[in-house]
Amino acid sequence: GPKVLQIPSHQIIDMGQMVTLNCDPVSNHLYFYWYKQILGQQMEFLVNFYNGKVMEKSKLFKDQFSVERPDGSYFTLKIQPTALEDSAVYFCASSLGQSAETLYFGSGTRLTVL
Amino acid sequence: QQQVRQSSQSLTVWEGETAILNCSYENSAFDYFPWYQQFPGEGPALLIAIRSVSDKKEDGRFTIFFNKREKNLSLHIKDSQPGDSATYFCAASPSGYNKLTFGKGTVLLVSP
């Protein structure tokens, strides 16, 4: 089936540094999402993105977070500066339409902030 | 406050048995209820889903039973196989909306 690719699968950085998580969504999809999962907890919605704009973001999407998809390339999540509590697995997803039925997820990027 | 709650963190069944995974929710606006299956090292993949207008959805060995009045649902996996061993997430969203609320997941182990 359709694949969402996330690069890298693991990232370790020092607190205060900047990190960019990359997502290659399904090629004809129009809506893009980031979810965050802390170990042992549920996946939680961070943000969705359509037509170059953030449509909705949760309270977990702090001011240090930003998303973009320049020129149809990777959909990225940037955290600057990082904090210890940003350590989690970040899942990217994409969908063709606005309905939740069409969401496809990547395999996640495990971010460790030291 | 958890809006989608899965009653078991883990469940072990023998091969050939029916595994039953339970889920409940709080938000009456939730209309769409997918179950996602996740294997280690992979992302969650949609397994089966139901809308609140239905009380049952079947797809092969997988069946969702839905009770709108009680705000709960369950996933039944008939004739469980070792390959079904995975984490199962119950999720929910309002109609026509693309933001899913997930439960914490149930780790299913099917022993041969």
Image (cartoon, coloured by chain):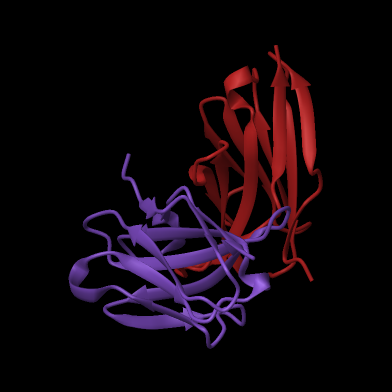
Chain colours: A purple, B red
Q: Relative to residue B106, is residue A56 depicted above or below?
A: below
Tell me the residue at 65%/20% (across/down): B80
Q: In which quarter of the image is the N terminus of chain B?
A: bottom right
Q: Relative to residue B11, is residue B73 depicted above or below?
A: below
* Residue A59 percent location from the top left of the image: 61, 82
Tell me the residue at 61%/55% (across/down): B91
Q: In this view, does A7 lie to the left or right of A36?
A: left
Q: Which residue lies furthest to the bottom in this view?
A: A63
Front residue of B5/A21: it is A21
Front residue of B41/A19: it is A19
Front residue of A24/B55: it is A24
* Residue A80 percent location from the top left of the image: 49, 81
* Residue B20 percent location from the top left of the image: 74, 33
Q: Is residue B89 left or right of residue B94?
A: right
Number of numbered discs on residues: 0
Residue B2, image quadrant: bottom right
* Residue B77 percent location from the top left of the image: 64, 28
Q: Relative to residue A51, is residue B104 depicted above or below?
A: above
Residue A98 appearing in the image: no
Q: In which quarter of the image is the C terminus of chain B?
A: top right
Residue A74 appearing in the image: yes
Tell me the residue at 49%/46% (across/down): B43
Q: Which residue lies furthest to the left in this view?
A: A71
